[in-house]
Amino acid sequence: MISFLKLIRWPNLLLIVISMKFTLFFVVYPALDLDWFEGGMDSGEFTLLVLATLFLAIGGYLINDFFDMDADTVNKPGKNLVGRMFSVLTTQVLYWVFTVTGVLLGVWLSYLIHQINYALIFLGVAGLLWFYSEKYQCQPLIGNLVISLLSGLSFGLVWLFEFFALSNKAITFTAVQANFGLVNRLVLIYMGFAFLVSLLREVVKDIEDFKGDDRFGCRTFAVVYGKEKGRVLALGIAFAGLLAAFWFQYYFFTAGFTMLFGAFFVLDGFFGLIIWRLRGATETKDYARISTLIKVLMLAGVLTMVLFYFEF
């Protein structure tokens, strides 16, 4: 069981659940002045959305480990699970079980909110995760951008499905529609934050995995252009993230969200520390520590959403 939890990246899954719940409970509902499950999705529909997202993510991790099986013998010696703790066949079966279940749950949710065409989102995500593992992750930046976009999507999906669930309840929809612009801005801020932090981690991870990727022909940015240029790229993304954090703070200040304005100084500090560490990074262990810092930064950013509950 412990090995299986490691295989499906349980800390990442927990972060997905927290991100989605916090988006709905601490951003969307307070901004719309609604009680929990008062207007749009009910608890069962929201659970379907979370499970569909989690199952697709698990499928993505499994197929990624399958395609990375050779490289992981170099990048993660003794820690690679596929081919050691789990057979190739078992991994493939688990991939199809979780992915198909995730898509079906998404279809069911789309049917319940009378937007069956949005089932294509879940099918598209499953397809992107497959092509990422099979092809995109070994192309400079393309795979990094795909994963970063999907990371931001988990925030956006909550508001997208809540919006269309609300549209089926005319009275409530009319009562709260004046606040849709605010919700759009807040959700976009966190989608942008998740995109930049995920992109930073992906680029740093490629530098960290340089040895195995190079040996087995995975043409990441670091492999094609060198670790030094990869480090410069990571620095550029980190600076962009810091500037974005400043811009978000300015918006919070002008909008009167004083607690959010103050909390983002913590994120500014994390970006600054990451930039400082990147400037002197040379060894694989340096990038491993930076990758851990980026994970903490992502968690800290998600946790700031709790403060919205006290701002309204």
Image (cartoon, grey):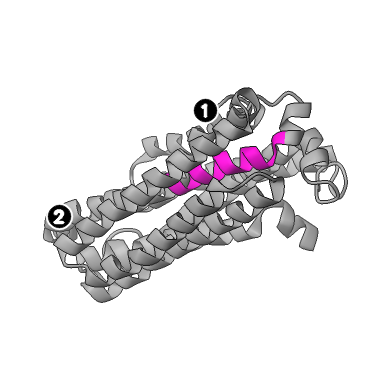
In the image, farthest residue toward the front: 280
User: Which quadrant holds residue 132?
Assistant: top right
Q: Is residue 190 left or right of residue 174?
A: right
- Pick the quarter of the image with the C terminus: bottom left
In the picture shown, does residue 242 fall above or below 268? above
Specify whether residue 198 is painted magenta: yes
Secondary structure beneath disc 2? helix
Secondary structure beneath disc 1? helix
For mark 1, what is the residue? 142
Specify whether residue 78 is painted magenta: no
Residue 258 in view here: yes
* Closer to the camera in the image, 179 or 72: 72
Q: For the residues carrying marks 2 and 1, which lies nearer the camera in this image?
A: 1
* Closer to the camera in the image, 76 or 67: 76
Q: Which mark is residue 177?
A: 2
* Closer to the camera in the image, 22 or 113: 22
In the picture shown, does residue 103 fall above or below 277? above
| Other-residue count near label 1 (Cα within 10 Å), few / some / many at <14 / 14–19 / ≥20 | some
Residue at 32%, 49% (x, y): give it: 244
Residue at 36%, 70% (x, y): give it: 306
Residues in magenta, as a range: 195-210
How far apart marks 2 and 1 lie (CA) works out to 37 Å
Say which amino acid is labelled 1. Ile
